[in-house]
């Protein structure tokens, strides 16, 4: 779906620098998109609140670039506050006029921007790749949390971060599913049905991961155009799941951790093979895939142990107390009630009574 992002600064050339970086993938500089962006200078964006709303009011994200060395940013501050009060997603970038200003103490004129919090205000040089990948990308992804797939597809700068997030989320989901079915498979009657379900659920999750990665990485919207390229990878993932199920079948209680690790590692390999194909245009060799799987399996085991450790511990049954002989029961009852217990009716009479006051039996 379309995503509208607006860039505003005092100088349009500053916006064009950021726009060029957003349209380029830092991992593959030859991939440049031509996604339209709304670019406006400060005077065009700044208007009286009583006037008609302009095109900026329809933007999904407003990025305001402020010169950190400027001593007069009243317009920028009023503009940003007006957008925020209107419910718009606003990101403020304090951009230094020169590289030397980046590490200098911020002047008093821009110190008030800090009160906005880290989520909405970042500081850095628009030409610095480290700032773009470590500050700008996470900030934009947080503000557009519900549009990450569209963001990555239209703006290559965000593709690496979104692809890694998709792979990580699917790996954790498959591992959690393997944990849930692994616990149930301890009961013999559930073993075979859940093993069959694993085949469909995990394969479906991997297939959706391949498709979503294709969308995020700018590939065709028709999955038939490229998913066949990874048929061999999906087949390998199925083989790994077979190994996991055999482990559970041999040692049910001990097989949960290996099964989770296999589910995690198989999904991790599938996702990264797709991503590497995007970066290099080549398929990953069998040796590289094996190395990738070994690393992912070790990480999967660590994650599986942490997830399994958070499960509620079953309560131990209390040992039943040994039955007391009748004489001991009567003695304990009498000591607790301070009276004499009748052997016939079991009721309690006074300590000095010679006969039961209920049935008349001699005590």
Image: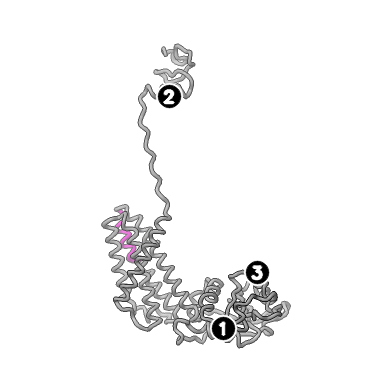
Q: Which residues are magenta?
A: 189-200
Quarter of the figure with the C terminus: top left
Instruction: Specify the principal SS of the magenta part.
Output: helix
**Residue 107, position in %: x, y?**
68, 76
For residue 115, the mark is 3
Of badges 3 and 2, the one in the foreground is 3
Which residue appears at 36% of the width and 29% of the height? 323
For residue 332, the mark is 2
Tell me the crowding category of disc 3: few under 14, some 14 to 19, or many 20 or more residues within 10 angstroms, Cα based.
Answer: few
**Residue 127, position in %: x, y?**
55, 83
Tell me the crowding category of disc 2: few under 14, some 14 to 19, or many 20 or more residues within 10 angstroms, Cα based.
Answer: few
Whole-angstrom CA distance, mark 1 to mark 2, is: 86 Å
Q: Earlier in the sequence, mark 1 or mark 2?
A: 1
Q: Is residue 76 in sight in this rendering?
A: yes
- The quadrant holding residue 62 is bottom right
- The quadrant holding residue 99 is bottom right
- Residue 191 in magenta? yes
Whole-angstrom CA distance, mark 3 to mark 2, is: 71 Å
- The residue where tag 1 is placed is 18
Q: Is residue 258 above or below residue 214?
A: above
């Amino acid at each position: 779906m379309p995503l509208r992002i607006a860039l505003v600064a005092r100088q349009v050339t500053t916006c064009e620098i950021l726009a060029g970086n957003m349209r380029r993938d830092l991992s593959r500089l030859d991939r440049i998109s031509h996604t339209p962006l709304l670019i406006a200078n400060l005077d065009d964006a700044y208007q009286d609140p009583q006037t008609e709303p302009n095109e900026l009011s329809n933007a999904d994200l407003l990025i305001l670039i402020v010169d950190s060395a400027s001593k007069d940013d009243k317009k920028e501050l009023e503009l940003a506050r007006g957008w925020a009060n209107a419910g718009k997603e606003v990101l403020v970038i304090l951009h230094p006029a020169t590289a030397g200003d980046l590490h200098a103490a911020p002047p008093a004129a821009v110190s008030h921007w800090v009160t906005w919090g880290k989520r909405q205000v970042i500081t850095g040089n628009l030409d610095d790749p480290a700032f773009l990948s470590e500050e700008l990308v996470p900030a934009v992804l947080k503000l557009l949390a519900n549009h990450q797939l569209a963001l990555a597809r239209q703006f290559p700068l965000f593709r690496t971060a979104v692809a890694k997030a998709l792979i990580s989320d699917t790996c954790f989901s498959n591992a959690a599913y393997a944990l849930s079915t692994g616990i149930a498979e301890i009961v013999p009657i559930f073993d075979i049905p859940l093993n069959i379900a694993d085949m469909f659920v995990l394969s479906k999750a991997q297939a959706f991961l391949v498709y979503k990665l294709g969308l995020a990485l700018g590939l065709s919207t028709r999955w038939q155009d490229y998913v066949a390229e990874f048929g061999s990878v999906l087949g390998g993932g199925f083989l790994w799941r077979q190994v996991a199920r055999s482990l559970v079948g041999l040692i049910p209680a001990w097989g949960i951790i290996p099964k989770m690790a296999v589910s995690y590692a198989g999904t991790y390999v599938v996702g990264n093979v797709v991503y590497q194909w995007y970066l290099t245009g080549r398929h990953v060799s069998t040796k590289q895939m094996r190395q990738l799987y070994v690393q992912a399996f070790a990480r999967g085991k660590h994650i599986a142990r942490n997830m399994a450790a958070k499960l509620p511990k079953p309560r131990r049954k209390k040992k039943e107390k040994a039955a007391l002989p009748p004489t001991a029961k009567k003695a304990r009852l009498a000591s607790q009630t301070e009276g004499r217990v009748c052997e016939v009716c079991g009721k309690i009479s006074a300590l000095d009574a010679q006969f039961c006051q209920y049935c008349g039996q001699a005590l």
